[in-house]
Amino acid sequence: MRHLCCLFLAVLTLAVSGTAFAEESTTAYGVELEGFPYPYPVEHFRFTSQGRELQMGYMDLKAKGQPNGHTVVLMHGKNFCGATWEATIAALSGAGYRIIAPDQIGFCTSTKPACYQYSFQQLAANTMALLKQAGVSQSILIGHSTGGMLATRFALMYPEAVEKLVMVNPIGLEDWKALGVPGRTVDQWYERELKLTADGVRQYEKSVYYGGRWKAEYDRWVDMLAGLNRGPGHKLVAWNSALIYDMIYTQPVVYEFPLLKVPTILMLGDADTTAIGSDIAPPEVKARIGRYNHLGPQVIKTIPNGRLIEFHGYGHSPQMEDPAMFHKVLLDELTRVEH
């Protein structure tokens, strides 16, 4: 297996070096997002996992002003990076929180292995190793989109290390496979990801994430994704993306919400319609998945010590759609005394 992985890496390397693109003009970034400006300095946590030397890029920001003694760990989504938490980092740091915002393996400024068995358990273990090195024994977890699935897994594995769990429009509030969404093989995901373009990302996010609305500031994040895919790591980036999509589809966390032992806040833009595989789902299946206005009230009943906050009319990323509104609510919830 290790020989096959090395062979696959060699094939990717040769293929990537000769790749050319006839796509709309988008900046091309390095395989670890070299060239894309992050809002704060990026550090690297080097470690060994599954027999490979890897590194996680992350931002570690001290509190501005008077520290309140709490650390917040921000977990990004599938089509996001640590950098997309920029406004949230500023708001939380200004309120006295230390912030750690990692890029998970396979994403953004972190290693893209040619072979890696992706699981939420593995990514949670990687994150715990990073936090131990950073001297963080307990933190508030805030996970957005796929990061909500990862934050849930982390809280289930390490409840003693979690002060509070906050999920912002997490995916995985339903089991798409059980609801009739057809599966894709990793090869099929890979072929799909090879075709990623800036226009495709923009159109998808506008219709699914933002309810048909678009702001010029979102283009920066489209450029980030498309530029990473368009760069010299094109095929390696697409391959890791395929493996990660397979993880998301095959590893639902919705059945384990009743096992959560930490105070949990579910924050949802109720106009969100995100659902993995909805593009190939039969019409009758597509009509009943990704309905966050229904999923929120259903799921919160299954979470012990859970609290639902709904943002009516907002989509998949309320923290980006209306930062001032979202961060006021978030800060109020973080300081709310649990009874």
Image (cartoon, rainbow, N blue to C red):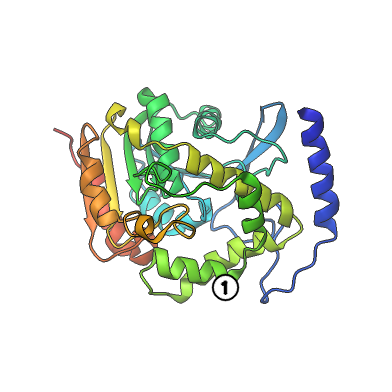
Q: Quick one: quadrant of the C terminus? A: top left
Towards the viewer: 4 or 233: 4
| Left or right: 152 as drawn, with respect to 109 | left
Q: Report if residue 109 is visible in the image.
A: no
In this rendering, the answer to whether 52 lies above or below 96 is above
Please state if 223 lies on the left or on the right of 27 as rendered: left
What's the residue at 62%, 68% (across, down)?
197
Work out which residue is located at the far left of the displayed protein and give it. 339
The residue shown at (82%, 54%) is 15
Looking at the rendered structure, the secondary structure element under dot 1 is helix
Image quarter where the N terminus lies is: top right
Vertical relation: 307 (above or below) 314: above
- Which residue sits at x=23%, y=55%? 310
Can residue 121 be seen in the rendering of this structure?
Answer: yes
Which of the 4 image quarters holds residue 319?
Answer: bottom left
Percent of width and height locating residue 213: 38, 74
Which residue position holds label 1? 199
In x, y percent, where is residue 308?
22, 46
